[in-house]
Image (cartoon, grey):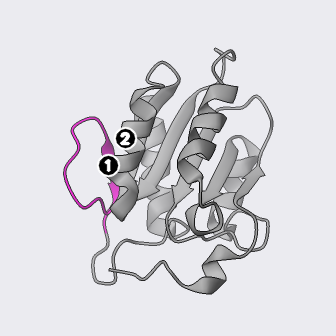
Amino acid sequence: MRDFTQPARATGPGVVADGPAGAATILVIDPAGEALHDEIPATWRPLAETLRIVWLRVPAAPSWKSTVDKVLTMHRDDTSTLLDVVTSGPLAADVIDLVRDHSDLVRSVLLVDPEADFPSARVIARSQSSPAPLPLGHPDVVAGLLDALNDLG
């Protein structure tokens, strides 16, 4: 398992966003804290042409659960916005619990290398070797996300 407690991961912004306001939104809850430089990872940038990507960097956002709740609550009145949530590994169970209270807003929960099976979520990528979980900026994660979004319509 990767060590996400590195001090450098706790620096930088807690939340980074890109993409058009009002577009379908991908909420990424990242235990590794990628997007250190106030930008989403390069592999995700082409997606920001048509999707709103909100990247929550857990190491830089100690109160990440309340931040997730706040982001989801902000969308409560916007019935036109689709929300899909992406997370990985050790956070999967916590994220599924959090979005359960917002099931009317969240279309799907998409997981990378979850530590258990969750019938209410879809696994979009698994690491083929250690260390796991795959970083959410990995190209296989983006490919799995695109497949899932295409399946969802």
Mark 2 lies on a secondary structure that is helix
Local crowd size for mark 2, using a 10 Å CA cut-off: few (<14), some (14–19), many (≥20)? many
Q: Residue at x 51, y 37 (%)?
A: 84
Local crowd size for mark 1, using a 10 Å CA cut-off: few (<14), some (14–19), many (≥20)? some
Q: Which mark is residue 93?
A: 1
User: Magenta segment, principal secondary structure?
Assistant: loop
Q: Which mark is residue 96?
A: 2
Quadrant in which residue 148 is drawn = top left
Is 15 left or right of 82, judged from the image as shown?
A: right
Judging depth in this view, the residue of 80 and 5 nearest the camera is 5
Q: Residue at x 40, y 35 (%)?
A: 151
**Mark 2 touches mark 1? (CB < 8 Å):** yes
Cα separation between marks 2 and 1: 5 Å
Q: Residue at x 48, y 18 (%)?
A: 104
How far from the left and from the top, in percent, is residue 127? 32, 72
Segment tinted magenta in the rendering: 113-126
Q: Residue at x 64, y 32 (%)?
A: 24
Mark 1 lies on a secondary structure that is helix
Q: Amino acid at mark 1?
A: Ala
Q: Relative to residue 83, is residue 94 depicted above or below?
A: below
Judging depth in this view, the residue of 141 and 108 nearest the camera is 108
How far from the left and from the top, in percent, is residue 31? 49, 65
* Residue 8 in magenta stretch: no
